[in-house]
Amino acid sequence: MSFKQVSFTVIVGLVVGICLNFSTMKSVFFTEVLSAFIIVCLLLRILRMYIIYRPIEDNVLINDDRIEAVNITKIMVTTCYYAGTVTLAQLAFRPIAGLNISDLFYFSSVFFLFFLMIKEGKITYYVYNRWMGIGLVIFLIGATLAIFNAVAPLESMARVFRVVFIIVIWFTLGTKILNHESKIHKVLTLWLCSVAFNGFIAMLQLRIDVPLTINHYGRMSSFTGHVSDLGGMSSVAWVPALVMATTSKGKKSIFFYIVLILIGLGAMLSGSVSGMITIFVGTFIWLLLSRLNFKFLFIITVLIAAISIVISVQTEKGYVTPLSRFESTTSMDANDSTSTMLSRFETYKSAWNQIERNPFVGVGYDGKSNKTDTGFPVHNLYLAAWYEGGIFALVGILIITGTILYLGIQSMRKAPSKLHYNLSLALFISFICSIVFGMTSPVLYQRYVWIPAALILPLYKLAVDYGKENRDTKSKKVKHKL
């Protein structure tokens, strides 16, 4: 390890130690945090030498010969998909039948794609992975049984359909449209901008009242409709923004710095402890798998400065701060009404009692059926799948999420270029963050936790296609020599 790397690690340790010790500044605590962080960074650096995957070729981009002549219908398919992505984080705008504006754009993209297929006389679909299909079928078996057991079967059916739409239609739509790395990079950028815009609006909420937003004692919702949604989508988007900021060059790097800072502030202003924990986990994994550089130090320094300013404004207005929010949320005092940890434990206990009575058939997915005896739904992705849909739904979700993680790893290992690898790394960690956040929130129907998967699938397909093209080219060369 070079002197530059050691120096960088020490400086990062100092900055993080100061940040963690912001309120107390006790020398003993500061020294312990600094020492522990330096040791962890050194261990991560050593581990990285053994687990990191390096693409063999640096500048290879997949040549897509399948791109056909441009026509207005194809332009509408792509344009609506991009529009749906750039408005994905603005959940508060629901102009028609409870559908948000992003839903309408994606439905329009599906409509134009279907019209194009009929026009060309061929209706095709992409089978991205048989295990995804198996997981979905098993999930639907459990969901169907639960629907018959629900208080409001039609509402339960509608929520199940949303999951099917996301996994089947939305995933397939992205796989068909995003047939080049540059398109995936563009969609990723649009998604990050959508989340960053919410962070900007959350900052405005510190000073002014913004329509369609919520300010719950200093916890901001921005245009998401709920403070937890702002924390969730910001924490899922954090690592992709971090990867883009540290791997881009020139003006693009500066642009992603700004996006990253706004996303981080959005997570902080949401007051979501789950979001903060998710960001920490995602950053830790990124440090484990990526190369440390001074851009990361710059980002941390600027972010600390921005957080300090925001905390000062929160304190001035009497709002909750990240530290006070974390302390109250994790409180084990039964008399503390702001503690959510105890209520979550009680909800989990109630859900488990129901599962023990009937582990095979769930209670249903509608707003009345999915609530436990505590009056709250289960805030855990896998436990909720079991409680609402029974054992089959749980197995189905486990297979689906496990398959996506596997495809993310394979996309990194088969990456034909640095761009492909960076995108795969960012989205792989982002999907892990989706699962981490899902451990404390009901997010099965939220598209913002599934978008990393929606982008991993076309990346994996591109990597596989490139491998096939490479093998075919080599085979032709061998035959030509013979």
Image (cartoon, helix red, strand yellow):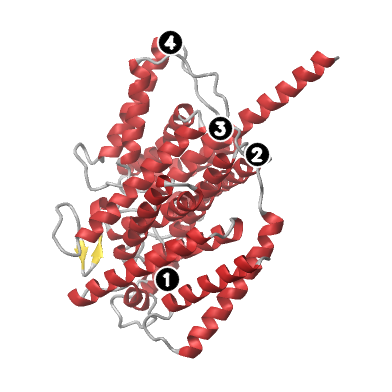
Label 4 residue SS: helix
> Height in image: 328 above or below 164?
below
Please, what is the three-letter code of the amino acid marked with disc 2? Lys
Residue beneath disc 4: 120
Marks 3/1: CA distance?
Answer: 37 Å
Marks 4/3: CA distance?
Answer: 22 Å
Please, what is the three-letter code of the amino acid marked with disc 4? Glu
> Height in image: 477 above or below 321?
above
Residue beneath disc 1: 345
Residue beneath disc 2: 414
> Height in image: 93 above or below 34?
above
Marks 1/2: CA distance?
Answer: 42 Å
Answer few, some or many: residues within 10 Å of disc 3's Cα (few below 14, many 20 plus, some between 14 and 19): some
Q: Quadrant of residue 170?
A: top left
| 176 to the left or right of 6 | left
Where residue 190 appears, x then y in whole percent? 36, 41
Q: Quadrant of residue 258?
A: bottom left
